[in-house]
Amino acid sequence: MKRKNRHLLAAAFSLIAMTIASAPSQAADRILNENSAGKTYAIKVGATFHLVLSSTYWSLTPLKSSAPIKLLGEPVVAVPSMAPGMPPGMGRGTVDWAFRATRPGTYTLAASRTSCGEAMRCTAEQGSFLVKIQVKR
């Protein structure tokens, strides 16, 4: 397994472990990521979920006031420690936004980025993230 994939896998396992440890009386929160793009997810009212994208260049599109989901605080940015031979920067790391489903409804959650690495502009597909959330009772 490549070093980059190991770091991403380790970050994902850490996030899952922290989620489970912080809510022992409930099932782990749903975690959405790049593989969730273009899909629709059903979330129950009152449930929490996370959007974890694997580049620190991602920005969340502000939620509309009519959204049936609520952003829970500031995003958590995790940057892996420097690996030998790896240059700093390049957006390495993850950004984790936590949400709570507040009422029934449908919402398209969006994020974007313009940089896909140091001095690399994103193509339209690389710079856009959309996922549909259906909040149900």
Image: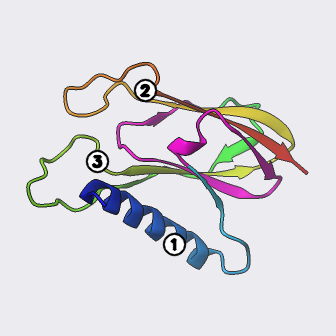
Quarter of the rendering containing residue 120: top left
- What percent of the width, then of the height, locates residue 28? 66, 69
In-front residue for pair 18/10? 10
Please name the amino acid that badge 2 sits on.
Gly
Q: Which residues are magenta?
A: 33-62
Residue beneath label 2, please? 127
Q: Secondary structure at mark 3?
A: loop
The circle drawn on residue 18 is 1
In the displayed structure, 57 sits above or below 46; it is above
Question: Could you tell me which residue is drawn at 40 percent across and 29 percent down?
Answer: 113
In the displayed structure, 97 sits above or below 18; it is above
In the displayed structure, 25 sits above or below 67; it is below
Q: Residues within 10 Å of mark 1 (few under 14, many from 20)?
A: few
Query: Which mark is in front, 1 or 3?
Result: 3
Q: From this viewpoint, which residue is outermost toward the front?
A: 1
Q: Secondary structure at mark 1?
A: helix
